[in-house]
Amino acid sequence: MPEAIELEQLWKFYGDYPAVRDLTLGIKEGSCCALLGRNGAGKTTLLRILAGLSPYQRGAVRVFGNSPRSAEARHRLGFLGHGIGVYEDLSARENLLFFARICELKNPQAVTGRWLERVGLARVAAMPVRQFSRGMRQRLALARTFLNSPRVLLLDEPFTSLDDRAIAMLSELLADSSREGATILLSTHQLREALAIATDVALVENGRLRYAGTRTPEMLDDPALLYRLHTELGAA
Amino acid sequence: MRTIGQALAVARKDLAVELRTKESFNAAGAFAISILLLFSFAFDPSPEMLHQIAGGLLWLVFAFAGALIFNRGFARELPNECLDALLASPLSSGSLLLGKAIANFTMLIALEVVSLVVFGIFYNVAWTFRAGELAIVFLLATWGIAIVGAAFGAMTVNLRLRELMLPVIIYPLLIPLLIAAIELTDVVLYSKQITPDQLLWGRILLAFDIVFTALAVALAETILVN
């Protein structure tokens, strides 16, 4: 399988502080990679660089062989960051319709209706998002992210603040996307949920890649194993 | 065509949000009307004095009220990190900037219509008899202000003092446009005929619009991402 995501000797600085240090990583097309690491390890920075939201100083980043800011890459990308990326004063339907239009989807009304059904928001589609509960907002954000059937999904802590129903929905969406051949990179602290769906694992610490490889059954039995074996803090 | 379609989607979304919240228009409208009323009561300008100041008064009010609209343009994208969602989407940066400029333009034109009505009543100026020529001047000048406001609104969106910084940056840039708009507005309101010399101001407006629209679209990626 060719690599959908390639990072080569990547360096990213915030002022003088190197948030990403000489990081090289390739993620194969169709794989689901769990990006693990403690707070401040550089996971969010990496995902933002891959989404084309944060410039880097040295190295190379490619999404399907293109720069993350290229139109080709962005047409294939779905990004869910810490914010839900939807407008409080618009309804759920208006939000999805807007994103369907800027993604230039054919028949945006039909696509929007389908996704509202899928995430269980069809009955409240006309309600402004500001009246939604946290769980409903998260489900709308998921619909927004998956709306254009992206070939590469970049998800930053997608399980955070989700209730059981939303976790099940997200797991199902990720499984479906995987079956359709999408490449998934998700950062998380919820090791069990992430490792259950991941085919590969990448572990970062202080901006450095400590481990990259296939997810093994041992990791499922003992999710903290990676940290103990491959991080300085774990070794200590 | 793709760029225009995406830009119209952005403008439509911004106008829908504004229609619901009226956060920019109410503030800008109240400001514009207050200044026009205060000026009228404070100076009680004679018809001769109005000949000299009408264009200046109107365009200064529009420019200052416009800053209140432009400040909200990109700030509206900050809650829930909507700007990140837009920048990571297939929407091109040029379309995003153009969409914001179209929304700015529409709101500013609406504000100008309201202000003109107030101006006509309180200053006793009959501007409707040359409404067509006045509309051309207003459309050209307003687009120039709107595109500059959108570009610099994007540049200052992450600054802590953006409400202060945006006017400080855009007014010096708008000087040639405002001078041309003021001159032409005075000519349209008070001259019987527009002479070829006076048409030069129209060419300046057109050139300003073309140059700044091309620059804004060409530099949109740098402005928004870097």
Image: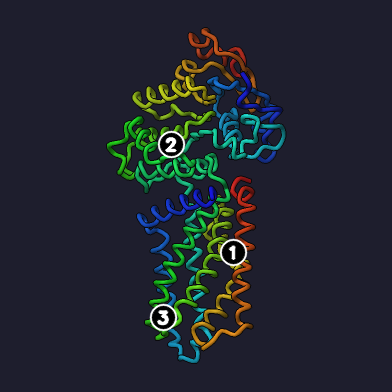
Under circle 3, the secondary element is helix
Under circle 2, the secondary element is helix
* Residue lying at 37% horizontally and 82% vertically, measured from the top left: B121
Under circle 1, the secondary element is helix
Residue B70, x across and y down, in percent: 50, 60
> Tell me, what colour scheme is on the image?
rainbow
Q: Which residue is mark 2?
A: A144
The numbered mark, 3 or 1, whose residue comes first in the sequence reads 3
Of residues A92 and A150, the one nearer the viewer is: A150
Q: CA distance from mark 2 to mark 3?
A: 47 Å
Do circles 2 and 3 both sit on a common chain?
no
Q: What's the amino acid at mark 3?
A: Thr
Instruction: From this view, report whether residue B105 is shown above or below residue B48.
Output: above
Residue B140, x across and y down, in percent: 54, 69
Q: CA distance from mark 3 to mark 1?
A: 30 Å
Instruction: From this view, report whether residue B84 is shown above or below residue A153.
Output: below
Residue B78, x across and y down, in percent: 48, 47
Q: What's the amino acid at mark 2?
A: Arg
Check contact, mark 2 vs mark 1: CB within 8 A.
no
* Residue lying at 42% horizontally and 22% vertically, measured from the top left: A171
Q: Residues within 10 Å of mark 3 (few under 14, many from 20)?
A: few
Q: Residues within 10 Å of mark 2 (few under 14, many from 20)?
A: many
Q: Which residue is mark 3?
A: B128
Of residues A140 and A37, the one nearer the viewer is: A140
Q: Which residue is mark 1?
A: B170
Q: Chain of mark 3?
A: B
Q: Chain of mark 2?
A: A
Q: Chain of mark 1?
A: B
Residue B161 seen in render: no
* Residue lying at 63% horizontally and 78% vertically, measured from the top left: B200
